[in-house]
Image: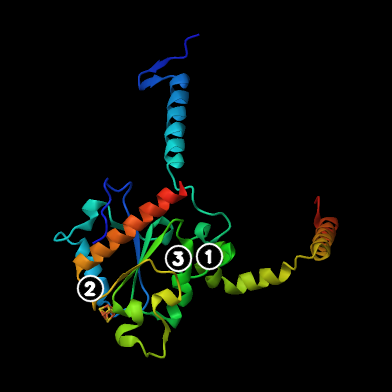
Amino acid sequence: MPKLPTKSFDRSLWVFHVNTGSCNGCDIEILAALTPRYDVERFGIKLVGSPRHADALLVTGPVTRDMEDKVKRFYEQMADPKVVIVIGSCGISGGVFHESYNLVGPVDKVIPVDVYVPGCPPRPEAIIDGVVKAWMKLERLRREKK
Amino acid sequence: MNLDFLTPYGFWNPILWLLVIFVALLVAYLIWLRGNSRYKKGTEQTKPFLSGYAPESKEAMMVSASNIYWGFTSTLKGYYNFLRKMHTGDIRDYLGWYVGIVAIMLILYILWGGA
Ligand code: SF4
């Protein structure tokens, strides 16, 4: 169990979600985390439409050849400090697609990854847990930078 | 000096307006100050976001004026093609046209002018 921060987070976390080749199962679970049942927006976790506005990059699926340059650009367009969260077994190891001719590989072969959330697909609780871990790392990075 | 203006339609004071503009600029500046200053200039971080695609040149991304007049120029294609041929961009051609037209007008004037 990670050590929880003693005070509340400094600021809300804006997340950019990208599907690099997932079957959409993980993406549906991310949406589930936003529904009234889990409602992560009440904690300030918000999906944004551009990586330039985001603190965290949420990646689902293995990286297909077509998405390789795009996911790199998403990562480079985010301001520092930033964190990358991979949701689902596909992004971690290739999962059910791991021997596909059309893959570059798991996400950490293309960009650095901070948090892995395994599962096919992971439950919304697991996704929220991963996001909170990434959030804590981000706050740490921010404090180190100050 | 009294700068107040009281008309049947309302009240006007230029000093008050300057104050309003100053406050608005101040608020805009404060909002700008709250922005993220960590973007590194000259890197991907300050380039436009185009769903992950590499940004093209500004000219290629903008709607050109020819798009707005497309219907017009397409309908009058014959006329425009003829006009375009005349517009060579060479000043000597334009001077040639000028001298030619003036010569024709002079001849016409000499033959029938002033009658
Ligand atoms: S981990 Fe499972 S649910 Fe998620 S994208 Fe891969 S196959 Fe789909």
Label 1 chain ID: B
Give the residue pinned by disc 3: A75
> Residue at image x 52%, y 60%?
B47
User: Would you place residue A21 above or below residue B43 in this image?
Assistant: below
One can see residue B69 in this view: no
Of tags 3 and 1, the one toward the viewer is: 3
For the residues tagged 1 and 2, is the chain the same? no
Label 1 sits on a secondary structure element that is helix
The Cα–Cα distance between marks 3 and 1, rounded to whole angstroms, is 23 Å
Dot 3 amino acid type: Tyr
Give the residue pinned by disc 2: A122
Q: With A135 as the anchor, is A82 left or right in this view?
A: right
For the residues tagged 2 and 3, is the chain the same? yes
Image quadrant in which you'd find residue A100: bottom left
> Residue at image x 38%, y 18%?
B7
Give the residue pinned by disc 1: B61
Dot 2 amino acid type: Pro
